[in-house]
Amino acid sequence: MTEIQALYQQVILDHNKNPHNFGTIEHADCSAEGLNPLCGDHINVYLNLEGDIITDIRFNGSGCAISKSSASIMTTLLKGKTIAEAEELFGKFHDLVTAEMDDQFDTDELGKLAVFAGIREFPARVKCASLAWHTLKSALEGKQITSTE
Ligand code: ZN
């Protein structure tokens, strides 16, 4: 394992152990439930909006370290962002985890999302990493439930 891979793995383990924004929002403006039956991941995402700005975002549920850390990192990135910015980040994240192994990315631009670059090696775990993002999208679109299958 390279030094950078080890660092990324540590970030994932840290977020799994101490997830950020873990909990619920009572009377959230929108929320959705996400399921990844392949792995057994199950998360809920809650959002409060002011106009098109995400003023609060929380998640809860249970799942593997990848799904939980991805949700945790997503919430830290999206608080205070607009819906359009959130969609743009989802696009970048999606491109990253579905890219070919030898594709190069600008890790400065990706910021914390870069920790998921290694996921490309494990196609089965891509659904774990993207579950929170798909659930967020469902919440913003007013869908109550999303499943990766
Ligand atoms: Zn999983």
Image (tube, rainbow, N blue to C red):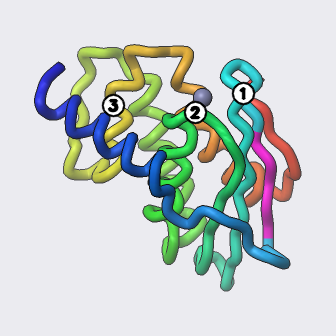
Image location (x, y in percent) of residue 34: 76, 42
Q: Could you tell me which secondary element the residue under label 3 belongs to?
A: helix
82 drawn magenta: no
Prevalent SS, magenta region: strand
* Disc 3/disc 1 C-alpha distance (Å): 22 Å
Residue furthest out toward the left: 3
| Magenta-drawn segment | 30-34
Q: Secondary structure at mark 2?
A: loop
Q: Are marks 3 and 1 in contact (CB under 8 Å)?
A: no
Per the image, the residue denoted by label 3 is: 117
Q: Amino acid at mark 3?
A: Ala
Is 80 situated left or right of 44 in this image?
A: left
Viewer-nearest residue: 53 or 133: 133
Could you tell me which residue is drawn at 64 percent across and 76 percent down? 52
Label 2 beta carbon within 8 A of ligand 1:
yes
Find disc 1 in the rendering and name its residue: 40
Q: Is residue 13 above or below residue 144?
A: above
Expressed as whole percent of the image width and height from the top left, the position of residue 97 reads: 44, 29
Task: Establish if 13 lies above or below 99.
Answer: below
Instruction: Name the residue that disc number 2 marks.
Output: 64
Query: Would you place residue 127 above or below residue 142 in this image?
Result: above
* Residue found 42% across the figure and 43% down from its top: 92
**Which marked residue is nearer to the observer: mark 2 or mark 3?**
2
N-terminal of the two: label 1 or label 2? 1
Query: In the image as oriented, which residue stretches furthest toward the front?
Result: 17
Q: CA distance from mark 2 to mark 3?
A: 17 Å
Contact, mark 2 vs mark 3 (Cβ under 8 Å):
no
- Note whether residue 85 is visible: no
For residue 39, above or below residue 142: above
Mark 1 residue's CB less than 8 Å from ligand 1: yes
Foreground of the two, 8 or 99? 8
